[in-house]
Each structure stands twice: as structure tokens, then as C-alpha cells.
Image (cartoon, rainbow, N blue to C red):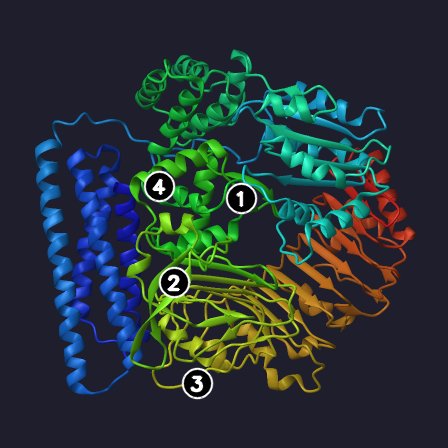
């Protein structure tokens, strides 16, 4: 249980930091010296586990279980003390002394247990340390410049023939609707091949509509239809399956479409959906991936395309690409060992990719490679599936311990889930998994952890942002099996630190932790704290079997009712660090039930509300300004009251995101409370006559602000101040005169500028040379701009130009095509003259030998992709 022990210690240390936060000094009576002493002892155990985790004896594993129990006990009593003191808020001296004495007794008990565990660990270490064989351990990061991590891209090494063959089968002249199955065991590369085909330029150009979605073993036809109508993305809807199917049929009718169904396990899934796919007699196609040949035989109108194993040459080529990021082995002493390892993978691409990622992050020492080869050879007599799992597990076991909790945490997501990277990193931080690094925020550390896991091919990037950053990730189902087994063996997750609720009218009875459907019989009794009163009563919550099985400590938690949604109230426990509530298909909003309940969520870091309509904002309670642990306040629309300034007013130094806040007043006093804000979205619904009262000129004092979104009517930039740290600016409906663009153009670090919904007004824009020195992305939409006089010198580093609904613009300036860095021009629903000018720029650049520029055109009548 070393991983569970490590994660528990990290989480407890985060709790102790929170207790000692300067903002808590006037609220809590704790013994700072005792807390500091306990933190030092915990840090010693963390250091021990980081050093010793690869060589834990059975006795040490038993003590790791005791560490978990002691850490859980400590978090329980700290939560009890904090919540009780916040509820009471008494200044009575006798009460304060009693509270202080009780806290000291409890922390002494835990400290004694930690001391006893540490003493026993040291005895075992001394007795067994020299006797144990010292196995080489993979370095946490590449230890030399020659250790090359993989790019993380879903490359298709060894599949060129498959790619060309399937593209040919999809695009041949057969007019009737055809179904093409890709068949192979898990890990043979079906999904990567299908994704590369889906994104192939010829396929993109041929089909009017392309939709990709994944089907899990436990699928819902209703959810699948909703995804198909939302370009493969999850979306809650109130329509029935029949209504969704009819709408899908109408959307697809008359279009040449390609639909990819990834991960089909039964013919029933296809039988339930095929009625809604019209045969337009125009070459539409359905491509599906499956492990089951009998399913493929039943479903396919074409012969199934079988994914075979790689031969020795292709296996070695793929291995080198992953281990060395090049063709061939640059280390002669490692070549023979590497070929043996690649051959032992039996031609299964996933095992080659994962073991290659493991070795790419080593220091390329022969001793370590021989150790890995020996372990891989020991699996030779296993059955093929077991053999594959053992090789994949080897990569997990050789992770540094600080990465293991992050990988195991992915088991909380459902099978085949596509995980938003921003959400995953927030959850890692909320769980307390991350090792603080001086000079870096926890968000930056989380990105490094993710990159490390991607480089090791344990997490795969499913979708990238337009700037090439990871946006959506997933875990292969074979790796997820390992993740689930290891997490269950470790009893890794015992307390839910996150609550995710998606409420919409008619969504039935759902689990109050994960939102899965439950029956009325699936209840659990929990103690509820009655906010504002010194009472604790019994309450019942509906919990699904998966959450009840995973979270063993539910009955030990204390619960409050802090928020409600239409027609129901949900309980939140006082240890929550991440709360997400989404309202779908409703004009209602989230309600804050009581001003006394909110502060009892004293360890909360992320508050994420997605509302049905941003024009009906949630009214946030002033108490939110007294929650110093908050890192992200993300609302679909909210009114945030001004903070009440007192001598002990806390500074929300951890707050990095504030979005989407209505009518926000940027006074110096308010901005002083959020000095480290990185992302802000503000919305002024009604026309403002006097902007001076909103003090937007004070934004210049947010020295760490990198992303700013402003939606307002007739905004004057002369009333605003932009910090030089700004990298992304989005203006919506602001109708700023083009003459004021000089203010934005002078921002030295601006990389993305998006002017949406008449963000600027006026018929002519004349950029000035020397401005926009670092601008990479420029998006213009719904503007009355007619004449744009621009040359390549005006945007020297532009990489992408996007124009949307620009009906009045005469043309794209031809000089734009001569920007050396420009890679993409996007045109969405613009005039024919803009489309023609984009094509002329492309033709001119092609004639000059520029093959790097691409043009994408989407109009009501056709789609073009160069």
C-alpha cells in the first residue's frame, strides 16, 4: 500500500497547510508548533517512500497500511475541529481553551502513531536494507540530454499499408451505405488507425460530415444519439430516444457522411442505431472498431479489415521511434538488448509503445535495460493477453511513486471516458497528489506530471488545442484494467474529494456523488450538519454501487447542504475540494442555501457551475471571499458581491480563475484580494453609460493575468488597462473603434486575439508596423469591416487566421499569405469574395513552393480542406 500511503501523506500535508493559512489565524485555535512538528515527521515518511518505493518489503507494505489509517484519522479529527470552530465562532475564553486542549490531545495521538510507524520502518530498513538486492530504478525524469521522451502524438508507425487500404475502401465508388469493421485484439492499434483515417486530408475533403464517438460495453442508446447530434461530445438532452433519432436522421439526410463507432462490443448496439443512418446513395460510410470477429461478420457490409501483429522489422521500427524518437538505435551497446525486448512484445503495438515509453525516460544505461529485458522475458510463457498485461504492468511498477497516484486516479472515470485535461489536473491538485516545487504553481506541476505520463505512453492525448496543447486525454482499456486492479489492491481512493452533479429536468434519480442513475433503495445514512445551528441530524443520500464500493469512508464524513438545483437539494461533505454542478435545458440556476454552510466547505479549491443560461446569473454569497483555498471559481454566469474589508480580510492568493462574473467592479480593493489571478471572464449584460464606476483601468495591476474575456456593449478601451502579462484577449460585442486597436497591438506578450460578435466596429482597419510582435492566432467574426489593409510585417508571427460570418469584408489581404509562420486560414460562412481571396492566397503560395499553408473553408453549400 505504498502508493496509498504516499497519496494520504501528501493529502494530509495539504490539509495542515490550510489549517495554518494566515487567513485562518483569526478563525481557528490550533497549536502551530505541534502542526509544524507533525509536518516534519510526515515529510520524512514522504521522502522515505520516494526513495524506497521500488524496494518495499512485505513488512514495509504492512506499515504503509498503518500510515494510511493514521493519515485518514488525522484528516478526520482536523476536519471535525475546523468545522466545529467555524460553526461556533465563539469568543468565549473557556470555549477557546477547551477547543485548543482538545486539538492538542488529538494531534498528539496521531503524532505518537506516526512516530511508532517511523521507528518500526527504520528498524526494518536497517535489518533488511543491506540484504535486499538493489534493483535499478528508472529515473523520475530523463537524466541526460540524450534521454529523449516521445512526442505524445498518436503516431502510426508500421500501419502505412493499413491506412492506404482502408482509405481506399472508404472512398471507392460504391454509392450505397457501407459498414467497414476494423477487427483486432486490444492493443493492436485499431483506434489509432481509425483516428488517422478520420483525420486524413482526403477523407476530410470527401465527406460533408464526420462524427466520431466511442461505445462502452455498458452503453445507452439515448446518450449515443445525443453525442451523434453534438459531434461526438457528451451532452445532456431532455428529448426521448425516438425524438433524437428522428432529428439525427434529418441532419444526416442528403449528406455524404462518415461515422466512426469506436469500441463496439455487440451487434445490439448497431441494431439500435442503424435505423437512424439514412442510405443517401452518395457514398456515406460507417467505420467501426471491435475486438470481436463474430460481431464484425454480422455488422459489416464489407469484409472486416483485420489488424495483424507487427513483424520483427516493424516492431523494431516502432520501438526505436518510442524509445529514441528516431529511426534506429543511437546506442550500439543497447541495440541487441532493445531488439530482444521488442521481439518479446510479440508484435503487439500497445506493449511496444508502453515499454518504449518506459525506456525513453531512463538514463540509457545498459544495466537498467538488461533489468527490464529480464523482467519482460520472465513473462514469455504466459497466455497472450496475460503476457501483454504483465508487460504493461511493468511500466506502471517502474513509475516514480509521485506519478503513480495520478495514473491510478484515472480509474474514477467511466470506461472509454474522454477526460478534459484541465479537469483532470484540477482533480489531481484537489486530491493533494502533487509534490510542490518552489517557483512553480501546482497547475504547472500538474502539466509536467501529465507530460511525463504521456511520454511514458500511459495516458494518450485524444485531442489537442489549436495551439498544440493537450486538451482531452484518455487511457487505453488494457491500461485501465491495470489501473483498476492496482487501485483496488491499494484501497487507493477511500474518500471522494470531488462531487460532480449534472441536473436537468427529467434526469431521474441519480447518485449525489457521480450523477449515475440509481434506484430509491440505494441510500446511505450520513450525519448532516445543520448550518447556522449547533445541530447534527441524520440525512439520507442516494449512492450508486460503484461509489459505495470505491469510497469506504462515506459514513465517516459530515455533510451540509450548501447548494441546491431545481427541484432538489444535494449534500456536500466538509472535506470536498472540487464541486461541479451543471444545469442543462433549464432557465433555473444554482442556489446558495445558507450563508453559514458555504464556509464549512473549508478545504474547497474549485467551484465549477455550468448554468443553463448565462443571462440568469447565480447570486454568490459574500462568504466566498473568506475561503483562502479557492483556486478556481468558474461560473456559467454569476454576480459576485464586493468583499467586506476588515483588518483580517484574507487574500485569495491561490485564486487563478474567475469566470464568468457579471458587472464585476475592478476596484483596487477587490483586485488586491486576488493578486495571482491568471484567467478572468467578465460580462456586462446591459449597456453601461458610465464605465468609470467599474474601474476596468485597474486591470493593469493584475500582473499575472494571462487570459481575459470581456463581453460588453460599446466598450471604450480608453476606460481599460491591460497588464503586459496578457497572452490571450477575447472581446465580445464591445464595438471598439478600429483606431483603438493600437492599444491592443502594443501588448508585448499577446499571442491570441479573438474579436467576436462585433468586437470592433468601423469599415476600415489599417494596422501599424511594429505592433502584435508575438500574435499567433487572430480571429475576427461578425464585424462590419470592409477594407483590411494588412501586410506580412503587421503580424510577423501569425500562425492562424480565422474569419467567421464576415459578410462585408471585401477580401483577405494578399500580403497575409507571405507571413512565414502562417500555417492555416479558416473561413466559416463568409462571403464568396473572402473564399475566393483565400483560395487565391493558397494558389499563389503553392506556386511559390509553400506547402505549409493550408486553407479550410466551411460554407452552407460546401466544405474544403487543402
Closer-to-camera residue (73/722): 73
**The N terminus sits in image quarter:** top left
In the image, what residue occupies the spot 60% across and 38% down?
215
Q: What residue would you read off at disc 2?
A: 576
How many numbered circles does the render carry? 4
Residue 170, horizontal then vertical, whole percent? 76, 27
- Give the residue at x 74% y 45%: 824
User: Mark 1 and 3 residues: CB-CB less than 8 Å, in contact?
Assistant: no
Residue 399 spot, x, y in % from top left? 35, 36
Q: Earlier in the sequence, mark 4 or mark 3?
A: 4
Reading the image, the residue beneath label 4 is 487
- Residue 644, which numbered label? 3
Q: Within 10 Å of the Cα at label 4, are there few (<14), some (14-19), or many (20+) other Cα atoms? A: many
Horizontal side of residue 743 vs 477, given as left or right:
right
Of pointers 1 and 4, the one earlier in the residue sequence: 1
* Residue 139 showing in the rendered view: yes
Determine which residue is flagged by label 1. 417
CA–CA distance in space, label 2 to label 1: 23 Å
Q: Secondary structure at mark 2?
A: loop
Residue 298, by quadrant, is: top right
Amino acid at each position: 500500500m505504498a502508493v496509498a500511503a504516499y497519496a494520504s501523506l501528501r493529502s494530509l500535508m495539504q490539509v495542515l497547510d490550510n489549517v495554518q493559512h494566515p487567513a485562518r489565524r483569526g478563525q481557528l485555535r490550533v497549536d502551530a508548533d505541534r502542526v509544524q512538528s507533525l509536518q516534519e515527521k510526515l515529510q520524512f515518511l514522504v521522502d522515505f517512500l520516494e526513495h524506497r518505493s521500488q524496494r518495499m518489503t512485505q513488512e514495509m507494505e504492512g506499515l504503509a497500511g498503518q500510515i494510511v489509517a493514521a493519515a485518514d484519522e488525522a484528516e478526520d479529527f482536523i476536519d471535525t475541529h475546523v468545522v466545529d470552530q467555524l460553526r461556533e465562532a465563539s469568543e468565549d475564553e473557556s470555549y477557546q481553551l477547551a477547543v485548543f486542549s482538545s486539538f492538542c490531545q488529538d494531534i498528539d495521538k496521531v503524532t505518537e502513531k506516526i512516530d511508532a510507524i517511523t521507528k518500526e520502518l527504520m528498524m526494518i530498513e536497517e535489518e533488511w536494507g543491506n540484504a535486499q538486492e538493489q534493483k535499478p530504478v528508472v529515473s523520475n525524469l530523463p537524466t541526460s540530454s540524450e534521454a529523449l521522451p516521445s512526442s505524445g502524438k498518436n503516431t502510426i508507425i508500421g500501419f502505412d499499408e493499413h491506412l492506404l487500404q482502408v482509405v481506399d475502401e472508404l472512398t471507392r465508388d460504391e454509392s450505397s451505405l457501407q459498414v467497414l469493421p476494423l477487427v483486432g485484439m486490444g492493443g493492436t492499434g485499431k483506434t489509432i488507425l481509425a483516428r488517422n483515417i478520420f483525420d486524413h486530408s482526403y477523407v476530410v475533403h470527401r465527406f460533408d460530415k464526420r462524427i466520431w464517438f466511442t461505445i462502452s460495453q455498458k452503453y445507452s442508446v439515448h446518450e449515443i444519439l445525443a453525442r451523434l447530434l453534438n459531434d461526438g461530445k457528451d451532452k445532456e438532452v431532455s428529448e426521448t430516444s425516438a425524438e433524437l433519432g428522428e432529428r439525427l436522421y434529418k441532419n444526416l439526410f442528403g449528406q455524404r457522411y462518415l461515422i466512426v463507432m469506436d469500441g463496439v462490443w455487440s451487434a445490439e448496439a448497431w441494431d439500435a442505431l442503424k435505423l437512424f443512418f439514412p442510405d443517401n446513395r452518395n457514398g456515406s460510410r460507417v467505420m467501426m472498431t471491435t475486438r470481436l470477429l463474430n460481431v464484425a461478420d454480422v455488422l459489416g457490409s464489407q469484409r472486416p479489415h483485420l489488424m495483424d501483429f507487427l513483424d520483427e522489422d516493424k516492431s523494431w521500427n516502432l520501438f526505436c521511434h518510442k524509445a529514441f524518437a528516431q529511426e534506429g538505435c543511437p546506442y550500439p551497446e543497447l541495440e541487441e538488448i532493445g531488439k530482444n525486448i521488442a521481439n518479446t512484445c510479440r508484435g503487439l503495438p500497445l506493449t511496444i509503445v508502453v515499454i518504449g515509453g518506459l525506456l525513453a525516460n531512463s538514463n540509457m544505461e545498459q544495466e537498467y535495460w538488461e533489468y527490464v529485458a529480464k523482467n519482460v522475458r520472465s513473462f514469455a510463457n504466459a497466455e497472450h493477453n496475460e503476457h501483454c498485461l504483465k508487460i504493461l504492468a511493468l511500466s506502471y511498477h517502474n513509475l516514480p511513486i509521485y506519478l503513480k497516484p495520478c495514473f491510478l486516479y484515472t480509474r474514477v472515470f467511466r470506461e472509454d471516458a474522454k477526460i478534459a485535461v484541465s479537469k483532470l489536473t484540477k482533480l489531481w491538485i484537489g486530491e493533494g497528489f502533487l509534490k510542490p516545487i518552489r517557483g512553480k504553481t501546482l497547475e504547472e506541476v500538474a502539466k509536467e506530471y501529465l507530460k511525463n505520463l504521456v511520454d511514458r505512453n500511459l495516458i494518450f492525448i485524444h485531442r489537442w488545442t489549436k495551439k498544440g496543447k493537450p486538451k482531452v486525454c484518455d487511457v487505453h482499456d488494457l491500461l485501465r484494467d491495470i489501473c483498476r486492479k492496482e487501485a483496488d489492491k491499494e484501497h487507493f481512493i477511500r474518500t471522494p474529494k470531488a462531487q460532480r452533479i449534472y441536473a436537468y429536468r427529467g434526469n431521474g434519480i441519480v447518485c449525489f456523488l457521480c450523477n449515475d442513475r440509481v434506484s430509491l433503495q440505494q441510500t446511505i445514512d450520513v450525519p448532516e450538519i445543520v448550518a447556522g445551528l449547533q445541530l447534527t441530524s441524520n440525512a439520507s443520500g442516494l449512492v450508486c454501487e460503484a461509489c459505495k464500493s470505491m469510497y469506504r469512508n462515506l459514513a465517516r464524513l459530515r455533510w451540509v447542504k450548501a447548494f441546491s438545483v431545481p427541484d432538489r437539494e444535494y449534500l456536500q461533505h466538509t472535506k470536498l475540494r472540487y464541486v461541479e454542478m451543471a444545469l442543462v435545458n433549464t432557465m433555473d440556476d444554482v442556489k446558495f442555501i445558507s450563508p453559514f454552510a458555504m464556509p464549512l466547505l473549508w478545504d474547497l479549491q474549485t467551484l465549477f457551475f455550468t448554468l443553463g443560461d448565462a443571462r440568469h446569473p447565480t447570486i454568490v454569497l459574500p462568504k466566498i471571499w473568506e475561503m483562502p483555498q479557492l483556486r478556481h471559481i468558474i461560473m456559467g454566469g454569476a454576480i459576485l458581491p464586493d468583499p467586506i474589508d476588515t483588518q483580517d480580510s484574507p487574500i485569495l492568493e491561490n485564486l487563478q480563475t474567475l469566470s464568468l462574473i457579471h458587472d464585476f467592479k475592478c476596484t483596487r480593493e477587490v483586485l488586491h484580494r486576488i493578486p495571482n489571478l491568471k484567467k478572468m471572464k467578465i460580462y456586462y449584460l446591459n449597456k453601461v453609460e458610465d464605465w468609470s464606476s467599474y474601474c476596468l483601468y485597474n486591470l493593469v495591476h493584475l500582473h499575472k493575468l494571462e487570459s481575459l474575456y470581456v463581453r460588453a456593449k460599446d466598450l471604450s478601451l480608453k476606460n481599460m488597462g491591460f497588464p503586459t502579462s496578457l497572452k490571450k484577449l477575447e472581446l465580445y460585442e464591445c464595438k471598439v473603434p478600429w483606431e483603438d486597436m493600437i492599444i491592443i497591438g502594443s501588448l508585448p506578450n499577446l499571442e491570441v486575439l479573438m474579436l467576436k460578435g462585433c468586437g470592433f466596429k468601423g469599415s476600415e482597419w489599417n494596422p501599424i508596423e511594429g505592433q502584435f510582435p508575438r500574435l499567433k492566432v487572430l480571429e475576427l467574426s461578425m464585424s462590419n469591416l470592409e477594407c483590411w489593409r494588412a501586410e506580412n510585417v503587421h503580424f510577423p508571427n501569425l500562425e492562424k487566421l480565422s474569419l467567421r460570418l464576415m459578410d462585408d469584408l471585401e477580401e483577405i489581404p494578399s500580403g497575409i499569405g507571405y507571413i512565414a509562420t502562417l500555417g492555416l486560414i479558416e473561413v466559416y460562412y463568409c462571403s464568396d469574395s473572402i473564399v475566393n481571396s483565400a483560395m487565391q492566397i493558397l494558389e499563389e503560395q503553392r506556386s511559390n513552393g509553400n506547402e505549409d499553408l493550408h486553407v479550410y473553408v466551411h460554407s452552407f453549400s460546401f466544405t474544403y480542406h487543402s
